């Protein structure tokens, strides 16, 4: 008997026992949907993050305080998290790092600012950051209209601003030319707009266009305090020099921090692509949890499918006897019932895959990710359904193939 004939017979039996088959298929669908949906949303978020860093991941790194907390003991003393990077240390690093690279120094101002222009104002969720003249190049921002800060504007702390497109949209009705040279208020401080950033959209649920950049010294004056941390970002001209540049940066910054030879670094180097790798590592547990949830659901589906197949064997005992009387072998009967179990699983799996992709991408779009077709997880779902079908159908198929044809024909 050909495989196509077995599939046709399986589909016929599915139609004849539609209700209980649908219930089993739904259980399988929920398991596959959980598996594919969660894994799809994770992959979509990682892809979105990777795309956001695509222009800077290969040739840049950051210097930041060590964030590992208490990590162990050296000579009876516990290692503490590193001190913040001060403004003075950041400026000193810019002067002393003798390497073909661009260095950007920046700091966080606030994330709850409100920008005003005339009668128009934004929601109180605008991010204000202090930046130097290299920030846009190192962070891969582009100016749509206007210009960047000059070194003089940064070091003298002038009241100038570069704004994101969301600010222009809210205050100037999307007219970028009108925004240039206009004076806006952020809190009680007025700034003259000298540039508008090209739109970058959203990443991981956070808009990249809802921000205002002000000169670094101005941000230090307004938002600075004793524990204020300044971010140092270094962009190289060639990715091949990354390891050498990092070694040089570590030596330079150790001297700036006045660390002794016996002391460990109280700062760490973070490569931009390392953020993606860390995110992948952190989501590994979520992936395993998703697979575990799906397997538990599929275990219930497998038991239900096995029960249906056993009932089917009992109901079709006479049919099996007729098939054997007409020359069907044990192998034919075994293949037929295994095919039926696999068909039911694959039908349920396909429904689960479709809904899993839709739900996973809908969740991702809500938090600013991009639509993704997870071919790897589709293949995993199909393979899982195949295995579940074979495992669930094996015992009922063996039982059917071993039925005595004479006893089967007598069965009522």
Image: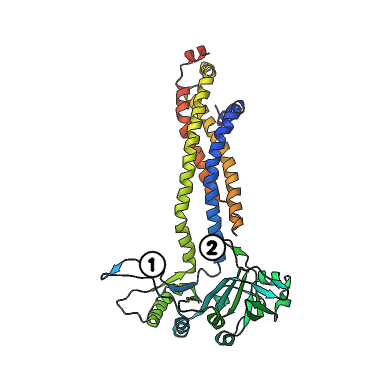
Q: Is residue 139 visible?
A: no
Report the number of numbered marks.
2
Indicate the quadrant where residue 252 lies: bottom left
What color scheme is it? rainbow
Q: Secondary structure at mark 2?
A: helix
Q: Nearer the viewer, residue 48 or 296?
A: 296
Q: Earlier in the sequence, mark 1 or mark 2?
A: 2
Q: Answer above or below: position of 81 versus 133.
A: above
Residue receiving disc 2: 50
Mark in front: 1 vs 2: 1
- Could you classify mark 1 by the number of other residues whose Cα lies within 10 Å: few (under 14), some (14-19), or many (20 or more)? few
Mark 2 Cα-neighbour bin, 10 Å: few <14, some 14–19, many ≥20: some
Q: Residue furthest left?
A: 75
**Seen from this angle, which residue lies furthest front?**
188
Q: Is residue 365 above or below residue 258?
A: above
Return the residue at label 1: 69
On the image, the x and y values in percent for residue 78 come to: 31, 69
For this view, does 240 lie left or right of residue 260?
Answer: right
User: x, y (%) of residue 303?
Assistant: 47, 32
Q: Which dot marks residue 171?
A: none
**Quadrant in which the N terminus appears:** top right
Residue 20 visible in image: yes
Q: Are marks 1 and 2 in contact (CB under 8 Å)?
A: no
Tell me the distance, in whole angstroms, between the alpha carbons under discs 1 and 2: 27 Å
163 left or right of 273 in image: right
Q: Residue 258 location, x and y as percent?
A: 36, 82
> Which residue is pictured at 52% across the width and 51% down the height?
39
Going 50% across and 69% down the picture, which residue do you hit? 58
Q: What element does badge 1 sit on?
A: loop
Relative to the observer, which residue lies in front, 130 or 347? Answer: 130
Q: Residue at x 61, y 64 (%)?
A: 202
Residue 346 drawn at (x, y percent): 55, 37
């Amino acid at each position: 008997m050909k495989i196509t004939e077995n599939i046709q017979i399986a589909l016929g039996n599915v139609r004849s026992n539609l209700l209980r088959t649908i219930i089993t298929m739904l259980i399988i669908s929920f398991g596959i949907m959980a598996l594919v949906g969660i894994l799809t949303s994770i992959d979509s978020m990682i892809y979105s993050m990777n795309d956001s860093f695509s222009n800077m991941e290969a040739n840049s790194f950051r210097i930041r305080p060590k964030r590992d907390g208490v990590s162990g003991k050296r000579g009876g003393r516990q290692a503490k998290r590193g001190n913040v990077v001060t403004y003075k240390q950041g400026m000193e690093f810019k002067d002393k790092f003798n390497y073909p690279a661009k260095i950007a120094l920046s700091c966080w101002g606030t994330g709850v600012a409100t920008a005003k222009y005339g009668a128009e104002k934004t929601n109180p969720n605008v991010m204000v950051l202090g930046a130097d003249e290299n920030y846009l190049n190192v962070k891969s921002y582009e100016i749509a209209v206007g210009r960047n800060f000059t070194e003089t504007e940064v070091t003298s702390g002038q009241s100038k601003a570069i704004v994101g497109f969301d600010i222009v949209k809210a205050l100037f009705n999307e007219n970028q030319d009108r925004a240039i040279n206009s004076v806006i208020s952020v809190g009680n401080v007025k700034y003259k707009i000298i540039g508008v950033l090209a739109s970058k959209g959203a990443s991981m649920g956070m808009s990249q266009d809802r921000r205002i950049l002000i000169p670094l010294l101005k941000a230090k004056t307004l938002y600075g305090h004793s524990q204020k941390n300044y971010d140092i970002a270094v962009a190289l001209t060639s990715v091949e020099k990354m390891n050498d540049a990092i070694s040089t940066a570590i030596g330079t910054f150790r001297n700036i921090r006045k660390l002794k030879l016996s002391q460990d670094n109280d700062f760490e180097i973070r490569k931009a692509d390392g953020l993606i790798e860390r995110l992948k590592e952190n989501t590994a547990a979520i992936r395993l949890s998703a697979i575990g949830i799906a397997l538990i659901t599929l275990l219930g589906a497998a038991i239900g499918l096995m029960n249906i197949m056993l009932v089917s064997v009992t109901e079709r005992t006479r049919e099996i006897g007729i098939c054997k009387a007409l020359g069907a072998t044990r192998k034919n009967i075994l293949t037929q019932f295994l095919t039926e179990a696999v068909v039911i699983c694959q039908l349920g799996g396909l429904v689960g895959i479709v809904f899993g992709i839709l739900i996973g991408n809908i969740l991702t779009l809500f938090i600013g990710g991009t639509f993704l077709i997870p071919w790897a997880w589709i293949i995993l779902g199909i393979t899982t359904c195949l295995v579940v079908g074979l495992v669930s159908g094996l015992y009922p198929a063996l039982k059917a193939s071993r039925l005595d044809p004479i006893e089967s024909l007598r069965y009522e």
